[in-house]
C-alpha cells in the first residue's frame, strides 16, 4: 500500500471551515468598528458645523437655518454669506442613527438659538442621545440615556 503525502478531504474541510469562521468574525468586527467610527464622525461634524454657523452668523449678521432633510438622512445647515450667496453645510446622518425628534432651528445673527431638545437613537449602542440646546449663548450638549 502506498502512503501518499497530503491532506485528507476531512482535514481540508475542517481547515476551510475554520478559515471561513475566522473571516466571518473578522468582517463582523470590522463592520462594528466602521459603524462606531461613522457615529463618532457624525457627532464631530455636527459640533464643527454648529460652531462654524454660530461664528458665520455673528460675522455676517445673517441667520443660519438648521433643518432635517425630508428623508431624515442629513442635517442641513443653510446660510448666506455677506454677498447673499448660499453657504450650505450638509451633514450625513449614519445609518445606525435614527432621528426621533428634530424641530427646525434658526441660529440668529448674534448666535442665539431658542432652547430646545433634539432626540437621536443609536441602533449600535441602543442608547438615546438628547441634543440639548441651551439658553443664552446658543451652545448645546449631548446627554446619553
Image (tube, grey):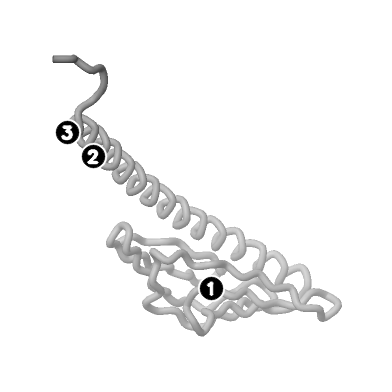
Where's residue 11, x and y in %?
19, 29
The residues tagged by marks 1 and 2 sit, at their Cα atoms, a distance apart of 41 Å
Q: Earlier in the sequence, mark 2 or mark 3?
A: 3
Badge nearest the viewer, 3 or 1: 3
Is residue 79 shown left or right of residue 128?
Answer: right
Tell me if label 1 and label 2 are in contact, CB under 8 Å: no
Mark 1, residue position: 74
Q: Earlier in the sequence, mark 3 or mark 1?
A: 3
Mark 3, residue position: 10
Classify mark 1: residues with Cα within 10 Å, few (<14), some (14-19) or many (20+). Answer: some
Which secondary structure, mark 3? helix
Occupied quadrant, residue 145: bottom left
Where's residue 58, x and y in %?
72, 69
Q: Quadrant of the N terminus?
A: top left
Which secondary structure, mark 1? strand
Q: Considering depth in this image, is 20 or 96 the residue closer to the camera? A: 20
Q: Residue at x 49, y 59 (%)?
A: 43
The residues tagged by marks 3 and 1 sit, at their Cα atoms, a distance apart of 52 Å
Q: Residue at x 77, y 68 (%)?
A: 59
Classify mark 3: residues with Cα within 10 Å, few (<14), some (14-19) or many (20+). Answer: few
> Above or below — where is 52 with respect to 74?
above
Occupied quadrant, residue 3: top left
| Residue positioned most to the front | 1
Q: Residue at x 47, y 56 (%)?
A: 38
Q: Considering depth in this image, is 135 or 10 the residue closer to the camera? A: 10
Q: Residue at x 46, y 50 (%)?
A: 37
Mark 2, residue position: 17
Is residue 11 shown left or right of residue 19?
Answer: left
Q: Earlier in the sequence, mark 1 or mark 2?
A: 2
Amino acid at each position: 500500500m502506498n502512503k501518499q503525502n497530503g491532506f485528507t478531504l476531512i482535514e481540508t474541510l475542517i481547515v476551510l471551515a475554520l478559515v471561513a469562521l475566522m473571516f466571518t468574525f473578522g468582517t463582523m468586527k470590522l463592520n462594528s468598528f466602521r459603524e462606531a467610527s461613522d457615529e463618532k464622525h457624525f457627532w464631530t461634524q455636527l459640533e464643527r458645523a454648529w460652531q462654524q454657523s454660530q461664528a458665520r452668523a455673528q460675522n455676517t449678521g445673517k441667520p443660519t437655518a438648521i433643518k432635517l432633510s425630508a428623508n431624515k438622512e442629513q442635517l442641513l445647515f443653510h446660510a448666506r454669506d455677506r454677498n447673499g450667496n448660499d453657504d450650505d453645510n450638509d451633514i450625513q446622518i449614519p445609518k445606525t442613527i435614527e432621528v426621533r425628534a428634530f424641530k427646525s432651528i434658526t441660529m440668529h445673527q448674534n448666535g442665539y438659538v431658542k432652547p430646545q431638545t433634539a432626540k437621536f437613537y443609536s441602533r449600535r449602542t441602543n442608547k438615546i442621545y438628547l441634543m440639548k440646546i441651551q439658553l443664552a449663548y446658543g451652545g448645546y450638549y449631548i446627554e446619553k440615556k
